[in-house]
Image: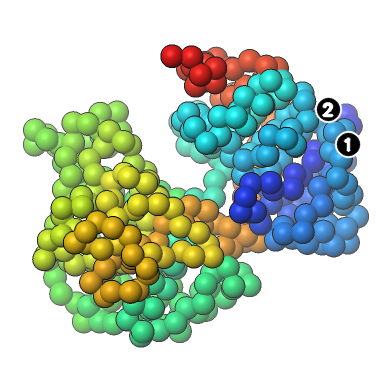
Amino acid sequence: MINSLKIGILRETKNPPDKRVPLTPSQIVDLRIKYPDVQFFVQPSDFRCYADDEYRYLHIPLQEDLSECDILLGVKEVDKSTFIPGKTYLFFAHVAKEQPYNLEMFRAMVEKKIRLIDYEYLTREDGSRVVAFGRWAGIVGAYNGLRARGIRTDRFSLKPAHQCHDLDEVWAGLKMIDLIPGLKILVTGDGRVGNGAMETILNTNAIEVAPGEFLTKQFDFPVVCQIGPADYVRHRDGKEFDLKHFFNNPSEYVSDFKKYTMVTDIYIAAHFWDPASPVFISAEEMKSEKFRISVIADISCDIAGPIASTLRATTIADPFYGYNRRTGQEEKAFKDARNITVMAVDNLPGELPRDASSDFGSQLISEVLPSLVLGRDSGMVERATICNDGMLTDHYSYLEEYLTGSE
């Protein structure tokens, strides 16, 4: 173990502020017992979901200056003016796909010789991620889709998830509503996000059915169907579907999703989409008289991507807008019953920050911190290290042109 290692918890600086934390107060207490030679410090925050007093009560030091810390943990992108040169930072950086809006932050990290470990790229040997908020995005995104349905129909009312104390209150509220017989809910995606969405839907009176039944049968009770790529794309030459081949060659496939648009009432998009993959719903398809979907909860939130109605990201404070199917334009939410209600919040786990933070912290403790604290990296931390000591690492050398702005 590295003696006298100091770990700091950053105050979130992205605007609007995110209330989540990488480690909860009780988790830090457990870590101090497990690693007695490691010290933890927390930067004060007025908007964190765990109040300063909750850390202070457990004798966890709060201090503004974290310059003595070796490792700094955050959640979202960090304000470049706050970077401390030469430190190791862990947060969701959103730079590895050459995102233009984070370029200046990235340049500052390289200039200040910071070691950036991006949570998103902490993976096992098989490529599976070890820490993520995906389940919580699915839970809240599906909840918002149901909430939109309640407002549209004036049949039931769900309070915003961020006004619920915790997940238990969310589940309790869902058990109070009564979805109408015959209502059909579709979820695309069978990973963490999609499974989180299914958790939400199955806390209502909806019953899960298979794709074939969903497409062909009418029911006297509400139903939900979860589908993956094998159900919504097909090879353009009629070859048998192969998931690995699809992931490696998405441009060889065409959409087979249109049939779902004609039988679905609420669509919850919880899939991963490659820009080379086929689109799900075009603007032209939405104009069809056979198009039935009235609510789209786009958790994936690929703007100008596979779902034509996702014109922009929405916010926790203002999650919905209306999409005019005839003009392709945005309108005020719930203004016209003929419009599609769109939910496209891009930081959904922030609506249940205490639950999401606790879950994330547990993943961090079991999967990542042993490598950082004990200094015994299996390769996982190396794979997620984007830059170090003023240089791009080998895995991310492809970012050189993005970083320098060269042609």
Q: Are marks 2 and 1 in contact (CB under 8 Å)?
A: yes
- Of the numbered discs 2 and 1, the one sitting upstream in the chain is 2
Find the distance from the CA under tag 2 to the CA under tag 1: 8 Å
The image shows residue 148 at horizontal and vertical percentages of: 39, 72
Mark 1: which amino acid?
Asp
Q: Is residue 181 above or below residue 110?
A: below
Label 1's element?
loop
Q: Residue at x 55, y 29 (%)?
A: 103
Q: Which residue is mark 1?
A: 37
Mark 2: which amino acid?
Ile
Task: Between residue 109 and residue 357, name the one nearer to us.
Answer: 109
The image shows residue 137 at horizontal and vertical percentages of: 49, 56
Location of the C terminus (image quadrant): top left
User: Can the viewer see residue 378 in this picture?
Assistant: no
The label number, if any, that marks residue 2 in the structure image: 2
Q: Is residue 190 above or below residue 201?
A: above
Query: In the rendered image, which quarter is residue 382 located in?
Result: top right
The image shows residue 40 at horizontal and vertical percentages of: 84, 43
Task: Between residue 313 and residue 242, name the one nearer to us.
Answer: 313
Residue 286 in the figure: left or right of residue 65: left
